[in-house]
Image: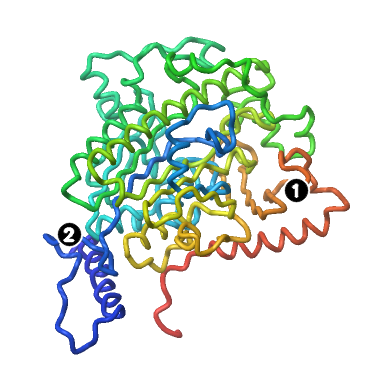
Amino acid sequence: MNRRDILRSSLLGAGAFAASSLGQSPDQPNQPNPHIWPGEPRELSGGKMPNILWICPDMQRFDTIEGLNNEHIHTPNIRKLMSESVTLTHTYVQNPVCSPSRASFLTGRYPHTTGLRALGQRIRPDEQLVTRMLSDAGYACGLSGKLHLSPTFGGRLEDRIDDGYSVFDWSHDISNLWPGHNMWRVWLNEQGVKWPDAPKGKEALAWGVPIDPKYTQTAWCSDKAIQFIRGQREFNPWLMSVNIYQPHAPYWPTEEYLSRYNAADMPSPNYRKGELSNKPVYQQVDHRAATGGHDISFVNTTDLEHRKMKAAYYAMIEQVDTEVGRMLRALEDTGQADNTIVIYMSDHGEMLGDHGMFLKGPYFYEGAIRVPMIIRWPGRYKAGLKSDALIEMVDLAPTLLEAAGIPMPVGMQGRSLTPLLTGRTTKQRDSIYCEYFDSLALYDPPPMAVCVRTNEYKMVFYQKLPVGELYDLNTDPNETDNLWDAPNARATRAMMMELMASRMVDTVDPIPERKCLW
């Protein structure tokens, strides 16, 4: 018996037990197991399992949604989706870097617990992704775009674990580092289309690509999702992960989308000259050049160039919004909208010039760790609800399992969002936890940092550095003034340090499960 058979057997056994606890008496005849093919899979309560359309653009920060928190961007389809969904305005990732964050929200476990705490590492092969658990319960799972749970640097092919995806249209980014394996690039070649060569120098900071938007990786990911949605119409339930690379840098939307934004109309980054003087050295390094001194320089670019990059970033998000609209229409056209959970989120944020830095790194500002989170399930979740409850991204996987009627495994560390999404409560957590354990191998000393945030304060502790960060979010929501060494903030710092220690204990791996007293 292989691992999949074992997991399926375990789930079916758990399902039989749960079904009996829901009203079947011991002397009643055995009921047909609802998870056995060819009968349509159903949740443990007997209801129909929902489909799941999981849209995850890469590196989209929280304040980029029209009608919610940004008057400069155009996202009409996401705005409409919000009116039909629950919008969780204070959702935080557990690491501000791609792979650790993805490992975390796909397992419902904290990054270091999964074994993937840094780029260049591979998730442990025995980690259970929520997609694997859903597949074992009868879901058909598909993916278009990136996954990034193992190293891909320099053209290395992603080494997959038993992830549950039976359809895997992989396209890590827009480069051509994986000839014959980046399926969007393969498709582009089949169409006889050549991706234009990028300009040199500062012209490449924000560039409108002269190509029809239908040939972009963004549109291709959406095309693959729509094909999957239509093909699965008679074969519910299904899950489709749409992992679009935009708006990840480089800031290269198509000419068509970039033409809709005027850089002069964009607000300048949230930065006050000199604010980094009493902050950790990593921020001073990335101020000079992002990603440990290897990428965009804030100090060597002008305010207009900063705003041009913001305009291009917004233009990429607008194209993502266009594709969101296409995918939602496919659900409507195939009659599947009412029984499909739609999720719109991102794996982490982007500094975008705030605090004098671009891209991402060993810091935990709102722009880096706070992301959009919009969830729709017609008739089940409260349409139009906006909640400012503190949410950790580890809470998503247990939510999906509960929606499908599947028991949550012992190792899952998140908490289901169902009470919040259904309006039964208004609170989820008292604090959020985020970590960065040498997640990008480009800094000296290697950054080992932990962040905790409450509604009132945010604190960051850096191992082996003399300074950390402490912000009063009521008086300083822009996180400009570091109170780490402020005499009048010592009691607050001690309180937050105690909370941090408690939250770090929360991340201890609950598996292997204790079987007996000794």
Q: Amino acid at mark 1?
A: Asn
Specify the label residue 474 is tagged with.
1
Residue that label 2 marks = 40
Most foreground residue, 58 or 287: 58
Most foreground residue, 479 or 364: 479
Looking at the rendered structure, the secondary structure element under dot 1 is loop
Image point 54% across, 54% down: which residue? 391
Q: CA distance from mark 1 to mark 2?
A: 51 Å
- 314 relative to 464, above or below: above
Specify the label residue 60 is tagged with.
none
User: Which class describes the residues within 10 Å of circle 1: few (<14), some (14-19), or many (20+)?
Assistant: few
Q: Amino acid at mark 2?
A: Glu
Please indicate, yes or no, whether residue 502 appears anywhere in the rendered image.
Answer: yes
Q: Position of residue 466 (x, y in %)?
A: 76, 47
Q: Position of residue 308 (x, y in %)?
A: 58, 17
Looking at the rendered structure, the secondary structure element under dot 2 is loop
| Cβ atoms under marks 1 and 2 closer than 8 Å | no
Location of the N terminus by quadrant is bottom left
Instruction: Kindly give the residue lying farthest to the right in the view shown.
Output: 487
Image point 62% across, 58% down: which residue? 431
Q: Quadrant of residue 186?
A: top left
Q: Is residue 499 left or right of residue 325?
A: right
Instruction: Kindly give the residue lying farthest to the left in the view shown.
Output: 38
Q: Quadrant of residue 354?
A: top right
Q: Position of residue 492 (x, y in %)?
A: 79, 57
Most foreground residue, 451 or 371: 371
User: Which class describes the residues within 10 Å of circle 2: few (<14), some (14-19), or many (20+)?
Assistant: some
Q: Is residue 257 left or right of residue 73?
A: left
